[in-house]
Image (cartoon, grey):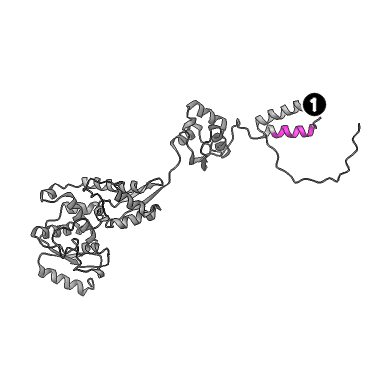
Amino acid sequence: MTTPPDTTPMVTPDPEPPIRYGRMALIALVAVLVIAAGFGVVVSARWLGGRVSDALTAPDEDAVLEVEPGIDVEVEIPAGATAEEIGELLAELGVIRSARQFEAAVDTAGVANSLKAGAFDLTTGMNPDAVINVLIAGPKISVFTITIREGLRVTEIIDLLSEESEIARTDFEEALFSGAVTTTLREMPAEPTFADWEGLLFPDTYEFSENTTASDMLNRMARTMQVRMDAVDWTAFEEAGFSKYDGIIIASLIESEVRVPDERPLVSSVIRNRLEIGEILGIDASTLYAMDTRDPGEINVDFDSPYNTRRYGGLPPGPISAPGLASLQAAAEPAESEFLYYVLSDEDGSHAFAETIEEHNANVDKAREAGLLG
Protein backbone atom coordinates (compact mmCIF):
# COMPACT_ATOMS: atom_id res chain seq x y z
CA MET A 1 0.00 0.00 0.00
CA THR A 2 1.28 3.44 -0.92
CA THR A 3 1.25 6.09 1.77
CA PRO A 4 -0.30 9.37 0.60
CA PRO A 5 2.04 12.33 0.70
CA ASP A 6 2.10 14.40 3.94
CA THR A 7 0.64 17.82 3.28
CA THR A 8 1.36 19.17 6.82
CA PRO A 9 3.34 22.46 6.59
CA MET A 10 7.02 21.91 7.38
CA VAL A 11 8.33 23.55 10.57
CA THR A 12 12.10 23.73 10.95
CA PRO A 13 13.06 22.73 14.50
CA ASP A 14 15.60 24.67 16.57
CA PRO A 15 19.07 23.27 16.06
CA GLU A 16 20.18 20.86 18.79
CA PRO A 17 23.70 20.01 19.77
CA PRO A 18 24.91 16.82 18.13
CA ILE A 19 24.51 13.67 20.18
CA ARG A 20 27.90 12.26 21.09
CA TYR A 21 28.57 8.61 21.66
CA GLY A 22 31.56 6.87 23.14
CA ARG A 23 32.73 3.34 22.35
CA MET A 24 30.01 1.78 24.47
CA ALA A 25 27.44 3.97 22.76
CA LEU A 26 28.59 2.71 19.36
CA ILE A 27 28.12 -0.89 20.45
CA ALA A 28 24.65 0.00 21.70
CA LEU A 29 23.89 1.72 18.39
CA VAL A 30 24.89 -1.36 16.38
CA ALA A 31 22.74 -3.51 18.63
CA VAL A 32 19.76 -1.24 17.96
CA LEU A 33 20.33 -1.53 14.24
CA VAL A 34 20.48 -5.32 14.39
CA ILE A 35 17.25 -5.43 16.36
CA ALA A 36 15.62 -2.98 13.97
CA ALA A 37 16.67 -5.04 10.99
CA GLY A 38 15.15 -8.11 12.59
CA PHE A 39 11.80 -6.36 12.68
CA GLY A 40 12.09 -5.16 9.09
CA VAL A 41 12.47 -1.51 10.04
CA VAL A 42 14.22 0.49 7.35
CA VAL A 43 16.86 3.00 8.58
CA SER A 44 18.18 5.57 6.14
CA ALA A 45 21.85 5.39 5.21
CA ARG A 46 22.19 9.10 5.81
CA TRP A 47 20.88 8.80 9.40
CA LEU A 48 23.04 5.75 10.05
CA GLY A 49 26.15 7.35 8.62
CA GLY A 50 25.73 10.43 10.79
CA ARG A 51 25.20 8.43 13.98
CA VAL A 52 28.14 6.11 13.32
CA SER A 53 30.35 9.12 12.54
CA ASP A 54 29.36 10.78 15.82
CA ALA A 55 30.07 7.59 17.73
CA LEU A 56 33.45 7.05 16.15
CA THR A 57 34.66 10.63 16.61
CA ALA A 58 33.32 11.19 20.13
CA PRO A 59 35.59 11.46 23.17
CA ASP A 60 36.39 7.97 24.46
CA GLU A 61 37.38 7.07 28.00
CA ASP A 62 40.03 4.81 26.45
CA ALA A 63 41.40 7.65 24.36
CA VAL A 64 44.67 9.41 25.20
CA LEU A 65 44.07 13.15 25.09
CA GLU A 66 46.56 15.72 23.91
CA VAL A 67 46.72 18.49 26.49
CA GLU A 68 49.07 21.37 27.15
CA PRO A 69 50.95 20.41 30.33
CA GLY A 70 51.68 22.61 33.33
CA ILE A 71 48.46 24.63 33.52
CA ASP A 72 47.18 25.04 37.08
CA VAL A 73 43.81 23.40 37.71
CA GLU A 74 41.76 23.42 40.91
CA VAL A 75 39.85 20.16 41.17
CA GLU A 76 37.02 19.35 43.57
CA ILE A 77 36.76 15.59 44.12
CA PRO A 78 33.22 14.79 45.32
CA ALA A 79 32.77 12.66 48.42
CA GLY A 80 32.06 9.03 47.53
CA ALA A 81 33.38 9.31 43.97
CA THR A 82 34.73 6.06 42.52
CA ALA A 83 38.12 5.76 40.85
CA GLU A 84 36.34 5.58 37.49
CA GLU A 85 34.39 8.77 38.18
CA ILE A 86 37.51 10.54 39.43
CA GLY A 87 39.41 9.47 36.33
CA GLU A 88 36.70 10.80 34.03
CA LEU A 89 36.65 14.12 35.90
CA LEU A 90 40.44 14.46 35.79
CA ALA A 91 40.52 13.61 32.09
CA GLU A 92 37.77 16.10 31.33
CA LEU A 93 39.84 18.83 33.01
CA GLY A 94 43.02 17.75 31.25
CA VAL A 95 44.81 16.82 34.47
CA ILE A 96 45.47 13.36 33.05
CA ARG A 97 45.51 12.18 29.44
CA SER A 98 43.52 8.99 29.93
CA ALA A 99 40.76 8.15 32.38
CA ARG A 100 41.26 4.44 31.73
CA GLN A 101 45.00 4.65 32.47
CA PHE A 102 44.26 6.40 35.74
CA GLU A 103 41.74 3.76 36.78
CA ALA A 104 44.21 1.01 35.87
CA ALA A 105 46.93 2.68 37.94
CA VAL A 106 44.58 2.89 40.93
CA ASP A 107 43.70 -0.79 40.56
CA THR A 108 47.36 -1.79 40.27
CA ALA A 109 48.27 0.16 43.42
CA GLY A 110 45.22 -1.13 45.28
CA VAL A 111 44.37 2.32 46.60
CA ALA A 112 40.80 2.81 45.38
CA ASN A 113 39.59 3.28 48.95
CA SER A 114 42.43 5.64 49.85
CA LEU A 115 41.60 8.44 47.40
CA LYS A 116 40.32 11.41 49.39
CA ALA A 117 37.63 13.92 48.52
CA GLY A 118 38.11 17.67 48.66
CA ALA A 119 39.80 20.51 46.83
CA PHE A 120 43.17 19.87 45.18
CA ASP A 121 45.58 22.10 43.28
CA LEU A 122 46.77 20.08 40.28
CA THR A 123 48.18 20.80 36.82
CA THR A 124 47.36 19.58 33.35
CA GLY A 125 49.25 16.65 31.85
CA MET A 126 50.15 14.99 35.14
CA ASN A 127 51.29 11.39 35.41
CA PRO A 128 48.48 9.22 36.88
CA ASP A 129 50.77 7.96 39.66
CA ALA A 130 51.60 11.53 40.68
CA VAL A 131 47.91 12.41 40.84
CA ILE A 132 47.20 9.30 42.90
CA ASN A 133 49.86 10.30 45.42
CA VAL A 134 48.27 13.74 45.79
CA LEU A 135 44.79 12.31 46.24
CA ILE A 136 46.02 9.83 48.85
CA ALA A 137 47.80 12.61 50.78
CA GLY A 138 44.53 14.50 51.06
CA PRO A 139 43.12 17.86 49.99
CA LYS A 140 44.81 21.20 50.46
CA ILE A 141 44.18 22.75 53.86
CA SER A 142 43.81 26.50 54.15
CA VAL A 143 46.08 28.10 56.71
CA PHE A 144 46.19 31.55 58.22
CA THR A 145 48.80 33.46 60.17
CA ILE A 146 48.28 35.37 63.41
CA THR A 147 50.91 37.61 64.99
CA ILE A 148 50.67 38.14 68.74
CA ARG A 149 52.98 40.99 69.66
CA GLU A 150 54.86 41.22 72.93
CA GLY A 151 53.20 43.07 75.78
CA LEU A 152 49.60 42.15 75.04
CA ARG A 153 47.34 41.12 77.91
CA VAL A 154 45.60 37.76 77.79
CA THR A 155 42.21 39.40 77.11
CA GLU A 156 43.74 41.30 74.19
CA ILE A 157 45.30 38.08 72.88
CA ILE A 158 41.92 36.36 72.96
CA ASP A 159 40.29 39.28 71.18
CA LEU A 160 42.90 39.07 68.42
CA LEU A 161 42.69 35.28 68.09
CA SER A 162 38.91 35.43 67.84
CA GLU A 163 38.97 38.22 65.28
CA GLU A 164 41.59 36.60 63.04
CA SER A 165 40.25 33.04 63.27
CA GLU A 166 36.54 33.93 63.30
CA ILE A 167 36.12 31.56 66.25
CA ALA A 168 33.79 32.85 68.95
CA ARG A 169 35.54 34.58 71.83
CA THR A 170 33.53 32.46 74.25
CA ASP A 171 35.24 29.35 72.84
CA PHE A 172 38.62 30.73 73.91
CA GLU A 173 37.30 31.67 77.33
CA GLU A 174 35.82 28.20 77.83
CA ALA A 175 39.09 26.56 76.78
CA LEU A 176 41.07 28.58 79.33
CA PHE A 177 38.63 28.15 82.19
CA SER A 178 37.62 24.51 81.63
CA GLY A 179 41.05 22.94 81.90
CA ALA A 180 41.27 22.20 78.16
CA VAL A 181 44.42 24.35 78.07
CA THR A 182 47.31 23.33 80.31
CA THR A 183 50.68 24.66 81.40
CA THR A 184 53.57 23.42 83.50
CA LEU A 185 54.67 26.91 84.51
CA ARG A 186 52.28 27.26 87.43
CA GLU A 187 49.57 25.36 89.23
CA MET A 188 46.17 26.53 88.11
CA PRO A 189 43.33 26.98 90.63
CA ALA A 190 40.16 24.96 90.20
CA GLU A 191 38.44 27.98 88.68
CA PRO A 192 41.12 30.00 86.86
CA THR A 193 40.67 33.61 85.82
CA PHE A 194 42.25 35.66 83.06
CA ALA A 195 44.81 36.90 85.59
CA ASP A 196 45.85 33.30 86.30
CA TRP A 197 46.65 32.84 82.61
CA GLU A 198 48.38 36.18 82.21
CA GLY A 199 51.89 35.91 80.77
CA LEU A 200 51.66 32.19 80.02
CA LEU A 201 50.79 32.47 76.31
CA PHE A 202 53.91 33.22 74.30
CA PRO A 203 53.70 36.15 71.86
CA ASP A 204 54.85 35.07 68.41
CA THR A 205 53.72 34.62 64.80
CA TYR A 206 51.70 31.43 64.47
CA GLU A 207 50.35 29.56 61.47
CA PHE A 208 47.11 27.69 62.07
CA SER A 209 45.02 25.49 59.78
CA GLU A 210 41.35 26.11 59.12
CA ASN A 211 40.49 23.12 61.32
CA THR A 212 42.34 24.41 64.38
CA THR A 213 40.15 24.86 67.47
CA ALA A 214 40.35 27.52 70.16
CA SER A 215 41.92 25.08 72.62
CA ASP A 216 44.44 23.98 69.95
CA MET A 217 45.59 27.57 69.47
CA LEU A 218 45.88 28.32 73.17
CA ASN A 219 47.63 25.05 73.95
CA ARG A 220 50.17 25.73 71.24
CA MET A 221 50.88 29.18 72.68
CA ALA A 222 51.15 27.75 76.19
CA ARG A 223 53.56 25.03 75.03
CA THR A 224 55.62 27.61 73.15
CA MET A 225 56.01 29.63 76.37
CA GLN A 226 57.23 26.50 78.13
CA VAL A 227 59.79 25.93 75.38
CA ARG A 228 60.97 29.56 75.51
CA MET A 229 61.29 29.40 79.28
CA ASP A 230 63.44 26.27 78.96
CA ALA A 231 65.69 28.15 76.52
CA VAL A 232 66.62 30.67 79.24
CA ASP A 233 69.25 29.94 81.89
CA TRP A 234 67.47 30.61 85.19
CA THR A 235 70.21 29.16 87.38
CA ALA A 236 71.52 32.40 88.90
CA PHE A 237 68.00 33.82 89.11
CA GLU A 238 66.76 30.88 91.16
CA GLU A 239 69.89 30.91 93.31
CA ALA A 240 68.94 34.50 94.20
CA GLY A 241 65.71 33.17 95.70
CA PHE A 242 63.30 33.72 92.83
CA SER A 243 61.08 31.21 91.04
CA LYS A 244 60.74 30.86 87.30
CA TYR A 245 57.20 32.22 87.62
CA ASP A 246 58.73 35.30 89.29
CA GLY A 247 60.86 35.54 86.18
CA ILE A 248 57.74 35.75 84.01
CA ILE A 249 56.33 38.47 86.28
CA ILE A 250 59.52 40.54 86.05
CA ALA A 251 59.75 39.94 82.31
CA SER A 252 56.18 41.19 81.89
CA LEU A 253 57.04 44.38 83.80
CA ILE A 254 60.07 44.89 81.57
CA GLU A 255 57.96 44.25 78.43
CA SER A 256 55.39 46.81 79.55
CA GLU A 257 57.96 49.48 80.43
CA VAL A 258 60.58 49.24 77.67
CA ARG A 259 60.34 50.56 74.13
CA VAL A 260 64.07 50.65 73.37
CA PRO A 261 65.37 47.04 73.27
CA ASP A 262 68.81 47.80 74.71
CA GLU A 263 67.21 49.08 77.93
CA ARG A 264 65.69 45.74 78.95
CA PRO A 265 68.66 44.60 81.08
CA LEU A 266 68.88 48.06 82.69
CA VAL A 267 65.20 48.14 83.68
CA SER A 268 65.64 44.60 84.96
CA SER A 269 68.52 45.77 87.13
CA VAL A 270 66.39 48.56 88.61
CA ILE A 271 63.67 46.06 89.54
CA ARG A 272 66.20 43.68 91.12
CA ASN A 273 68.01 46.45 92.98
CA ARG A 274 64.79 47.83 94.46
CA LEU A 275 63.59 44.36 95.47
CA GLU A 276 66.92 43.66 97.21
CA ILE A 277 66.70 46.77 99.39
CA GLY A 278 62.96 46.37 100.03
CA GLU A 279 61.96 49.47 98.07
CA ILE A 280 58.54 49.54 96.39
CA LEU A 281 58.76 49.16 92.63
CA GLY A 282 56.45 52.06 91.76
CA ILE A 283 55.79 50.72 88.24
CA ASP A 284 52.65 52.41 86.99
CA ALA A 285 52.08 49.83 84.23
CA SER A 286 51.19 47.34 86.94
CA THR A 287 48.64 49.69 88.49
CA LEU A 288 47.11 50.38 85.08
CA TYR A 289 46.78 46.62 84.60
CA ALA A 290 44.81 46.38 87.86
CA MET A 291 42.58 49.24 86.67
CA ASP A 292 42.04 47.49 83.29
CA THR A 293 43.29 50.45 81.29
CA ARG A 294 46.39 51.43 79.36
CA ASP A 295 45.86 55.18 79.57
CA PRO A 296 48.45 56.77 81.91
CA GLY A 297 46.12 59.75 82.27
CA GLU A 298 43.61 57.53 84.09
CA ILE A 299 46.00 56.22 86.71
CA ASN A 300 44.93 56.33 90.34
CA VAL A 301 47.99 55.86 92.53
CA ASP A 302 45.71 55.08 95.47
CA PHE A 303 43.90 52.27 93.64
CA ASP A 304 43.60 49.41 96.10
CA SER A 305 45.07 46.33 94.44
CA PRO A 306 48.11 44.13 95.08
CA TYR A 307 49.09 45.07 91.52
CA ASN A 308 49.48 48.69 92.66
CA THR A 309 53.24 48.71 93.15
CA ARG A 310 53.10 52.21 94.60
CA ARG A 311 51.12 50.92 97.57
CA TYR A 312 52.33 47.35 97.98
CA GLY A 313 55.91 46.11 98.15
CA GLY A 314 57.49 43.24 96.28
CA LEU A 315 56.37 41.86 92.96
CA PRO A 316 52.74 41.99 91.85
CA PRO A 317 50.92 38.66 92.28
CA GLY A 318 51.22 37.76 88.60
CA PRO A 319 52.43 38.91 85.18
CA ILE A 320 50.78 41.94 83.62
CA SER A 321 51.38 41.07 79.96
CA ALA A 322 52.88 38.49 77.61
CA PRO A 323 56.68 38.87 77.64
CA GLY A 324 58.86 37.94 74.70
CA LEU A 325 62.11 35.99 74.81
CA ALA A 326 64.33 39.09 75.11
CA SER A 327 62.46 40.25 78.22
CA LEU A 328 62.63 36.76 79.73
CA GLN A 329 66.39 36.74 79.20
CA ALA A 330 66.70 40.22 80.69
CA ALA A 331 64.75 39.11 83.75
CA ALA A 332 67.08 36.15 84.23
CA GLU A 333 70.24 38.18 83.61
CA PRO A 334 69.87 41.84 84.61
CA ALA A 335 72.62 44.33 83.90
CA GLU A 336 75.17 45.06 86.63
CA SER A 337 74.18 48.52 87.90
CA GLU A 338 73.39 50.59 90.95
CA PHE A 339 70.38 52.22 89.30
CA LEU A 340 67.23 52.57 91.38
CA TYR A 341 65.23 54.96 89.18
CA TYR A 342 64.35 55.66 85.58
CA VAL A 343 62.14 58.15 83.76
CA LEU A 344 61.34 58.96 80.13
CA SER A 345 63.99 61.10 78.48
CA ASP A 346 63.03 61.06 74.81
CA GLU A 347 59.98 60.69 72.58
CA ASP A 348 61.41 57.42 71.22
CA GLY A 349 60.79 55.85 74.64
CA SER A 350 64.32 56.10 75.95
CA HIS A 351 64.82 56.47 79.72
CA ALA A 352 67.25 58.34 81.93
CA PHE A 353 68.56 56.13 84.73
CA ALA A 354 69.68 57.33 88.14
CA GLU A 355 71.25 55.95 91.30
CA THR A 356 70.04 58.65 93.71
CA ILE A 357 66.72 60.37 94.26
CA GLU A 358 68.32 63.76 93.64
CA GLU A 359 69.60 62.70 90.26
CA HIS A 360 66.24 61.14 89.47
CA ASN A 361 64.32 64.31 90.40
CA ALA A 362 66.55 66.29 88.08
CA ASN A 363 65.77 63.86 85.27
CA VAL A 364 62.06 64.16 86.02
CA ASP A 365 62.26 67.96 85.75
CA LYS A 366 63.96 67.65 82.37
CA ALA A 367 61.27 65.26 81.18
CA ARG A 368 58.55 67.68 82.24
CA GLU A 369 60.26 70.59 80.52
CA ALA A 370 60.42 68.49 77.36
CA GLY A 371 56.71 67.73 77.60
CA LEU A 372 57.31 64.01 78.11
CA LEU A 373 55.39 63.79 81.37
CA GLY A 374 51.89 64.93 82.24
104 left or right, relative to 216: right
Asked if residue 133 lies left or right of residue 222, the reply is right
Please state the horizontal and vertical placement of residue 103, each as a whole percent of the image: 54, 30
Badge 1 marks a residue whose secondary structure is: loop
Q: Which residue bears the numbered disc 1?
A: 39
Question: Residue at point 90% right, 39% down?
Answer: 5
Locate the C terminus by quadrant.
Answer: bottom left
Task: Decide which of 303, 220 is in the foreground and name it.
Answer: 303
Does the stretch in magenta take in 252? no
Instruction: Estimate how packed mark 1 is, as few (under 14), some (14 to 19) or many (20 or more) residues with alpha carbons within 10 Å.
Output: few
Task: Relative to 71, say whether 196 is above or below.
Answer: below
Amino acid under label 1?
Answer: Phe
The location of residue 244, given as percent across then percent down, is 17, 49
Identify the residue at horizontal 26%, vertical 57% (top origin): 151
Spot the residue most to the left. 277
Q: Is residue 346 placed above or below 215 in the rendered structure?
A: below
Which residues are drawn in magenta? 45-54
Question: In terms of image quadrants, where is residue 336?
Answer: bottom left
Picture coordinates of residue 261 (x, y %)?
A: 23, 58
Up-down relation of residue 47 to residue 149 (above or below)? above
> Residue at point 13% right, 63% down?
280
Residue 302 position (above or below residue 28): below
